Image (cartoon, helix red, strand yellow):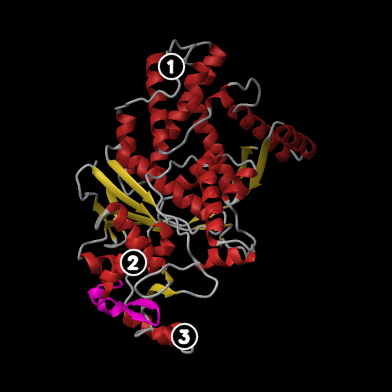
Amino acid sequence: MTLTLYNTLTRRQEPFETVEPGKVKMYYCGVTVYDYCHLGHARACIVWDVVRRYLQFIGYEVRYIQNFTDIDDKILNRARVEHSSMEVVADRFIKAYFEDMARLGIKEADEYPRATHTMNGIQRLIHELENKGFAYPAEGDVYYAVRQFAEYGKLSGRKLEDMQAGKSDRVNVEDPEYQKKKDPFDFALWKAARPGEPAWESPWGAGRPGWHIECSAMVRDRLGDTIDIHAGGADLIFPHHENEIAQSEAVTGKPLSLYWLHNGMVKVDGEKMSKSLGNFITIRELLDRGVDPMAVRLFVLTAQYRTPIDFTDEAIAAATNGWHTIKEGLLFGYQYGEKLGWELEKGEHYPIENSDVERFQEIVNNDFNFPGGLTVLFELAKELRRQGHILVHEGKTETSPDKLKHQWQTLVTLAGVLGLEAEIEAETDKSSGLSDAEIEAKIQQRQEARQGKNFAESDRIRDELQAEGITLIDSRDGTRWHRN
């Protein structure tokens, strides 16, 4: 059951071997803190949170670093609009980030370096690049000489000659920055100070770092020359991660990362998410609508992490239904354990070894196949739900209490690996409300009424379910539902 990962750098799936046996050094390119986090951020943060949890589950000691980009043109523009400062804007949205991630059940990273707190490391790296002939100063700016790095393009698969063919019509030769460069492909490592902007003193004059050099310096300062996993969204492959490789490896002569992993993008109703299209959804907007954070996690995990994912009302309703199934299984022990003679301690962790765990691990070891792993959870949850219904109606279960306890502990353990947790007090204290089976029965009654053209009865059942907090969504594939 060897873990194998698809490596963007080599374009193939490879066995996972770390620099230091049993330990993983992992870096995730985090957010630029100028606004609230959106669904794309939610997907990335959930994916890499679960990757980290899974690596720990199979025995690795993981050091997980996630940065904040806290100096950027977008942050500065927002500060101007708000008559504020870059630091105030950045601090506000870093605080908001932690609030949003806590609601989604994201475990905090081991460290969150900020670009503005890594200025010494950034300047040291630029100085080394300059000494090795990979960087040159130009009127207060410093640029990376791309053609000096022979392997440039190895991550993205892009070749300079191919990019050159289509670049000439996109270049503004009157641009002062373009005129400073020795080559159009060169990119900024350091930018000279502009009036009214924050600046730091440096050997090249007052200024601020370019975006790409920040991550190279933060990786090196926190994790060393070579790490095991460098993660981020697919939109960062070029130019950001490509430039990180060029900067870091030109200085160290070592691989920056053994494995480059990238999550796919999020679409909304088939369209790219953007404010101009009016489909831009922040995490807090979505959760404030009443969508369960665990349903959001499940929605993300039902797609292979490298593929695009489409956010629709139907998709989130399906994820909500799926979460209710798993939640019923997770709550089984707290609802029926005493009746079955179990002794439980809240928050107890269960070291489990059985065929279900082995099957889960074998599936997920294939390039973090979390959708496949979820099938094991659904099987366990549905069986526990079935046994719960039998216990309620017949006073006993078909399966022995000891075996049920083992199945429940297995579900709790595997759900924890995926970050899926039910709120025990809030759910077990409920004395009313329809079960999933009762809801499905009413939906079937409604369907029969519709087929008989008894639309008044159909509407009555819909209204009855709505009063119970159940929303129905009709589509060509049938009727889906979710709890509000």
- Could you classify mark 1 by the number of other residues whose Cα lies within 10 Å: few (under 14), some (14-19), or many (20 or more)? few
| Residue ID at (45%, 49%) | 45
Residue type, mark 1 in image: Leu
Residue 447 in the image, given as x and y percentages of width and height: 68, 37
Dot 1 falls on a residue whose secondary structure is: loop
Residue displayed at 34% across by 68% down: 242
Residue 165 covered by magenta stretch: no
Instruction: Identify the mark at residue 321; answer none if there is no mark.
Output: none
Depth check, mark 1 against mark 3: the one in front is 3
Which quarter of the figure has residue 463? top right
Cα distance in 3D space between marks 1 and 2: 55 Å
Specify the amino acid type for callout 2: Gln
Q: Nearer the viewer, residue 421 or 111?
A: 111
Q: Are marks 1 and 3 in contact (CB under 8 Å)?
A: no
- Of the residues under marks 1 and 2, which one precedes in the sequence? 2
Query: Where does the magenta region start and end?
Result: 131-153
Residue at 62% across, 22% down: 430
Instruction: Report the residue marked by disc 3.
Output: 176
Q: How far apart are the alpha carbons under marks 3 and 2?
A: 23 Å
Whether residue 256 is situated above or below residue 461 in the rendered picture: below
Residue 463 visible in the current orientation: yes
Image coords of residue 226 (percent x, y)? 24, 56
Q: Amino acid at mark 3?
A: Pro
The secondary element bearing badge 3 is classed as helix
Q: Are marks 3 and 2 in contact (CB under 8 Å)?
A: no
Above-or-below relation of 166 to 71: below
- Identify residue for label 1: 344
**Residue ID for mark 2:** 123
> Which is more toward the observer, 189 or 11?
189
Q: CA distance from mark 1 to mark 3?
A: 69 Å
